[in-house]
Image: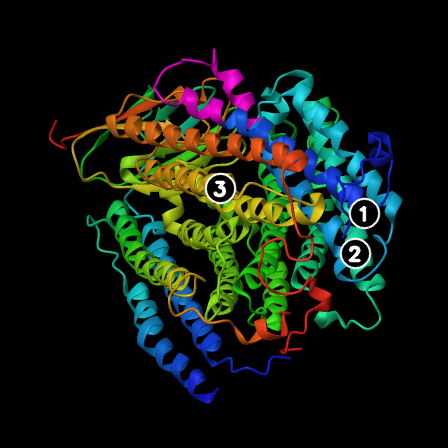
């Protein structure tokens, strides 16, 4: 139908598609890097329930609302929930994974800085969702 | 054009009418009423978050109910009915038919909204607008949740009836002289969005029934304790409601397609690329639903597929922006209120889209998912683009419908306040999300950055609120007492009385 | 049309293939872990650079259009369609 020249629009669409291809490939690459779980990562079982987090280390020690890890080591979280959906989030380390009852979701990280970092729930889970918080303690490997 | 308010009729004649303009106006007035009701809830939410701790809302359950009803109201009782109202009013005029194809069905579809709205507002459920199981099955309290489910069920049927009506009207009742390619873009937007509704809604309708029986304890589709899968619900829900986003945005773009050429004093740059982009958008809308679910433990392959599906929607959206820019180019633009809203809407459309690309890029989702970034992002869409297009169109149709002119100064003040407010609230919320504030929280720890940004956002919401108050006064006052307008050319654009089917667009 | 296809081929070779290559070669050395913060924030900042550049171009264009083609601009002339009075 159009009798006017459309070359400008074609170039524009080409640029948009090229940009999206770039975004997609960069994202794909980054995702691939961070999804690759190191073989020597220590497993921590994370259980969310209304409205607190429970952590179980490989050696069987359990923690509630607090998680102690060593700096420079890799940890793999196996996340699940006892009641409703939660979302396990350590924002400072960009760790985020939903805790879904009946499923075990995994995400891994290797803390690099010693300190205390907040753990929170990012999926709506009811009355005290806003305060379903915990603390991550990253400790020196020697202690 | 019918001058609704110059020939006063008794209210019941309008209420029991099946004429498309009457039904259209009822849709529009109802939806704008819900805009204000939902807006009050939004102001409450923002006011509560001004300081950490509990101030004006007594407990978190009340807060959760408020944001649930706010979301449900704005999506299902404001945006969808508003678009349906505009479509009812203008589609028959544009395709040159005396009415919608099924006038009674049309009235029925409208009259399903008040009972549904009553259920939602009297119930005041708390499980967020997407009612995820298992929370919605085992934890959400009482009749509120069931009332919400029934309300949504009714609204779904209403949408489907409306969609059937639009599709039949446009395809079967258009004037024989008019080819499908000549159908104006606003009518095309209703055709494509109705097709999406028809394909998408039944999935959610099924999911709602399953959710209800799960709640009654007789089934366990989504209840892990009975062997069900809560993720299945999320797939079914987003299979409906990601396309639904396009059901909202496509008519808003159609409305901009009416406003922008008119006030630029030029025909649309490319009618055919507008149609192409609408059709493309309606198809790719089905390829991206699970980008809402990256964090539920999807595989790398799944995530890649849905990321590509999401990015595929960008070129089609960008074509619309190109069309708008090319239409304004070399025009002689009159910045009356509707044009301001439309141009503001395009500007914010870009920001919303860019935020969407970030969400879709898989690893970045772990920063933004379920944080205030997402809240800011989709509000830029629903408020910044869709509501801007809709409100602009409301100003645009006002003189045609009432025969009176709204107050231009107040209209422009409304635009400026809304634009500034939208930028203040929703851009700030993006940053807030990057600082890690989760969404749907009643209270937050007193981190200085969080407090500062929440306060900026709250101030912004009040700026929008002031604008909306001006809007309300303007509409009510001008409808009765405004200056009598020239119905042929209310905006003094110089052209003749114009409706799209009369236009001599040299390009077709 | 052909030149556009050619352009995309060149783009594909220049941009996509090295990235894919790099991705498959990415390291597996024991004890040396990828820092997800670095990877993700790095990606974020690169995308923001592009987004803000494109955003500046798009909004700049829109602002310029609004300024240049407003009817009160000194150089504003009636569009060809105005003479017929319909558009």
- Pointers 2 and 3 in contact (C-beta within 8 Å): no
Inter-mark Cα distance, 1 to 2? 8 Å
Q: Quadrant of residue A63?
A: top left
Kindly indicate whether the residues beneath marks 3 and 1 are on one polypeptide chain: yes
Q: Residues within 10 Å of mark 2 (few under 14, many from 20)?
A: many
From this viewpoint, is residue B134 visible?
A: no
Please state the extent of the stretch shown in magenta in the rendering: B43-68
Marks 2/3 same chain: yes
Task: Return the residue at label 2.
Answer: B92
Disc nearer the start of the sequence (1/2) = 1
Chain to which the residue tagged by mark 3 belongs: B
Is B487 one of the magenta-colored residues?
no
Residue assigned mark 1: B20
Relative image position of residue B158 (x, y in whole percent): 77, 40
Secondary structure, mark 2, is helix
> Disc 1 vs disc 2: Cβ atoms closer than 8 Å?
yes
x then y, percent, for residue B392: 56, 48
Where is residue C33? Give x, y as percent: 23, 49
């Amino acid at each position: 139908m159009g009798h006017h020249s459309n070359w400008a629009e074609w170039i524009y669409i080409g640029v948009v598609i090229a940009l999206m291809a770039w975004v997609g490939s960069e994202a794909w690459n980054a995702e691939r890097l961070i999804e690759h779980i190191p073989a020597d990562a220590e497993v921590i079982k994370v259980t969310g329930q209304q409205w607190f987090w429970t952590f179980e280390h490989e050696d069987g020690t359990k923690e509630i609302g607090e998680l102690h890890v060593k700096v420079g080591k890799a940890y793999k979280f196996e996340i699940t929930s006892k009641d409703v959906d939660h979302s396990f989030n350590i924002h400072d380390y960009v760790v985020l994974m939903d805790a879904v009852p009946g499923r075990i979701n995994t995400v891994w990280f290797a803390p690099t800085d010693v300190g205390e970092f907040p753990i929170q729930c990012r999926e709506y889970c009811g009355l005290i969702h806003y305060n379903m918080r915990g603390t991550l303690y990253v400790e020196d490997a020697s202690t | 054009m019918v001058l609704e308010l110059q020939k006063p009729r008794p209210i019941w004649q309008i209420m029991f009418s099946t004429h498309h303009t009457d039904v259209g106006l009822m849709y529009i007035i109802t939806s704008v009423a819900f805009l204000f009701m939902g807006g009050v809830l939004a102001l409450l939410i923002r006011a509560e978050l001004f300081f950490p701790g509990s101030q004006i809302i007594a407990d978190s359950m009340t807060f959760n109910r408020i944001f649930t009803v706010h979301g449900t109201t704005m999506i299902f009782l404001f945006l969808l009915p508003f678009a349906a109202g505009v479509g009812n009013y203008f589609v028959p005029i544009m395709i040159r038919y005396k009415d919608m194809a099924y006038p009674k069905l049309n009235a029925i579809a409208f009259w399903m909204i008040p009972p549904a709205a009553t259920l939602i507002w009297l119930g005041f459920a708390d499980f967020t607008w997407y009612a995820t199981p298992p929370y919605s099955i085992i934890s959400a309290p009482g009749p509120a949740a069931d009332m919400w489910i029934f309300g949504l069920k009714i609204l779904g049927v209403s949408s489907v009836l409306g969609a059937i009506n639009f599709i039949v009207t446009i395809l079967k009742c258009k004037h024989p002289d008019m080819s499908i390619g000549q159908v104006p873009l606003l009518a095309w937007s209703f055709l494509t969005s109705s097709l999406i509704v028809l394909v998408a809604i039944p999935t959610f309708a099924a999911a709602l029934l399953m959710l209800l029986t799960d709640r009654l304890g007789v089934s366990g589709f989504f209840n892990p304790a009975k062997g069900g899968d809560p993720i299945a619900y999320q797939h079914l829900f987003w299979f409906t409601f990601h396309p639904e986003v396009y059901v909202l945005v496509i008519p808003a773009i159609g409305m901009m397609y009416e406003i922008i050429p008119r006030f630029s004093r030029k025909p649309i740059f490319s009618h055919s690329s507008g149609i192409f982009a609408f059709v493309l958008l309606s198809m790719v809308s089905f390829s991206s639903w699970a980008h809402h679910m990256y964090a539920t433990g999807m595989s790398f392959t799944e995530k890649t597929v849905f990321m590509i599906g999401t990015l595929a929607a960008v070129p089609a959206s960008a074509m619309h922006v190109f069309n708008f820019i090319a239409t304004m180019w070399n025009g002689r633009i009159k910045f009356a209120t509707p044009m301001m809203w439309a141009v503001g809407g395009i500007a914010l459309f870009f920001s919303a889209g860019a935020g969407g690309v970030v969400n879709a890029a898989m690893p970045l989702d772990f920063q933004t998912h379920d944080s205030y970034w997402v809240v800011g992002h989709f509000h830029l869409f629903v408020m910044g683009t869709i509501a801007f297009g809709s409100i602009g169109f409301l100003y645009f149709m006002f003189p045609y419908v009432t025969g009176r002119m709204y107050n231009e100064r107040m209209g422009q003040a409304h635009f400026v306040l809304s634009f500034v407010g939208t930028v203040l609230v929703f851009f700030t919320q993006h940053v807030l999300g990057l600082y890690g504030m989760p969404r749907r929280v009643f209270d937050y720890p007193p981190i200085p950055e969080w407090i500062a940004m929440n306060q900026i956002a709250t101030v912004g919401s009040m700026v929008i609120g002031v604008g909306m108050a001006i809007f309300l006064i303007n509409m009510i006052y001008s409808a009765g007492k405004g200056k009598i307008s020239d119905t042929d050319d209310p905006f003094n654009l110089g052209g003749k009385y114009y409706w799209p089917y009369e236009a001599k667009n040299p390009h077709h | 049309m052909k030149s556009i296809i050619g352009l995309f081929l060149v783009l594909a070779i220049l941009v996509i293939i090295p990235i894919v290559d790099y991705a498959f070669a990415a390291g597996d050395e024991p004890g040396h872990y990828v820092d997800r913060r670095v990877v993700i924030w790095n990606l974020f900042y690169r995308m923001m650079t592009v987004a803000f550049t494109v955003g500046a171009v798009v909004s700049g264009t829109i602002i310029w259009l609004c300024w240049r083609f407003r009817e009160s601009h000194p150089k504003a002339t009636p569009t060809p369609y105005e003479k017929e009075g319909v558009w």
